[in-house]
Image: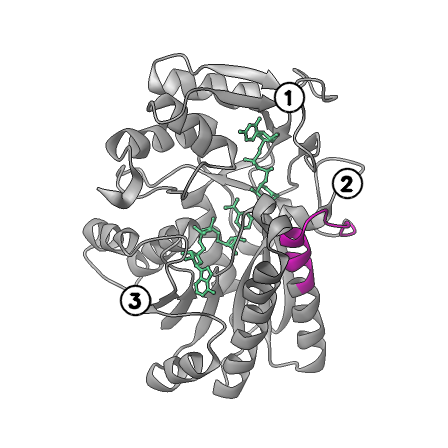
Amino acid sequence: MKILVTGGAGYIGSHTTLALLEAGYEVVVLDNLCNSSDAALHAVEGICGKSALMIRGDVCDRALLDRIFQQHSIDAVLHFAGLKAVGESVRKPLEYYETNVSGSITLCQAMAAAGVFRLVFSSSATVYGEPEQMPIREDFPTGIPTNPYGQSKLIVENVLRDLSQAEPRWSIALLRYFNPIGAHDSGHMGEDPSGIPNNLLPYISQVAVGSLQELSVFGDDYPTADGTGVRDYIHVVDLADGHLKALQAIDGRTGIHTWNLGTGDGYSVMQVLRAFEQACGKPVPFRVMPRRSGDIAESWADASKAEKELGWKATRNLQDMVTDTWRWQSNHPNGYLE
Ligand code: NAD
Ligand code: UFG
């Protein structure tokens, strides 16, 4: 079975490409490498001894997509390609809507033209906005995203919902990720953000490795146990496995299906920081700063639907996540660049 993985050189896409190859799938990656490098795919090959076919190009390029579907007998698409920096999306909304929304529409048009109707889409817990209660279930109403990135995910979810109504041949999985962190346990694949990281884990690990001076803890006055923000962190390898389970679950099952991919446990910024210090064996300097605009106090998943319907459950705990992150970061202080 042959799978097209858009954004397959990126953080989550590369870990999922590895999982697909290990499970015996053939993989074609389409990535324009705007936020990644093909070194991630070389690492995949080094780990499993198999390789994906890498095609460098843009998911908005309809002619290229048509050629890919003509040349390869693609059975299904995992669609990771997109831009994901919340702050940047506020400054560059058109780029975000073009890549994330137009890119997804162009991909669906090319898929339909080629008769490929099985799609797994990378959505985000951000579509829930600020729910009134925890844990978050899939049937909670979606919120009003506070930034173009979040909007783009919600728009694509709605487009895909309309599409599956209009054309019953589609089998679509919307996977709402909580907070993906961690790295492959080989220590040779992981998250390699360009520039200064926006997210907690890459920031902490770059402080620990000496590339950054100290972590800013954004707010310690939230209504949480220790006052810092609480999130549901999920190991990227568990997340990758969730994609394989979703891909199998929608085989022959039409319609649109939504699953949260999280662990069901929430940890505060300070808990993550302390766990990381244990993993790296040294203190990580931090300073409490004001809240970051747009952040919510807490967010964690009810992950029982995925367990029941996909037979999938995250198996790696917070200590595994920070230990694997540190192994990757200390082996590769400059990411894939060296
Ligand atoms: P990433 O930036 O590492 O991977 C995205 C990949 O898409 C990159 O390799 C990038 O080069 C590629 N890409 C971007 N624009 C493209 C285009 N126009 N054409 C072809 N390729 C393009 O990000 P990630 O963390 O692996 O995220 C993957 C997906 O999951 C994204 O859609 C993201 O929005 C979604 N997501 C991520 C998180 C998270 O916290 N990492 C949370 C929820 C959802
Ligand atoms: N935080 C800090 N300091 C930092 C970075 C983050 O204290 O330098 C805190 C945040 O305030 C928050 C927690 O750490 O309480 C997690 O923040 P992240 O930026 O790592 O993650 P978010 O929950 O803000 O956002 C992530 C993804 C978004 C996605 C969202 C919901 O980055 O793309 O989860 O799925 F939309």
Residue type pointed to by label 1 = Thr
Give the distance between the C-alpha atoms of the residues marked 3 and 1, in whole angstroms. Answer: 41 Å
Lateral position of residue 164 relative to residue 52, left or right: right
Q: Is the residue marked 1 within 8 Å of ligand 2, measured from its CB?
A: yes
Residue at point 67%, 26% (across, down): 291
Type of amino acid at the residue the image marks with label 3: Met
Q: Residue at x 28, y 28 (%)?
A: 330
Q: Quadrant of the N terminus?
A: bottom left
Q: Quadrant of residue 26?
A: bottom left
Asked if residue 269 lies in the magenta stretch, the reply is no
**Residue 317 seen from this side:** no
The amino acid type found where label 2 is placed reads: Pro
Q: Is residue 34 visible?
A: yes
CA gap, disc 3 and disc 2: 40 Å
Which tag is nearer the camera, tag 1 or tag 2? 1
Q: What residue is pinned by disc 1? A: 228
Give how far across and how far down residue 251 sits, in percent: 51, 71
In the rendered image, which residue does mark 2 sit on? 131
The residue to which callout 3 is attached is 54
Quick check: is 154 in the magenta stretch? yes
State which region is magenta: 141-155
Q: Quadrant of residue 101?
A: bottom right
Q: Position of residue 227 (x, y in %)?
A: 68, 18
Which circle's residue, 1 or 2, is located before the other in the chain?
2
Question: Which one is in front, 300 or 62?
Answer: 62
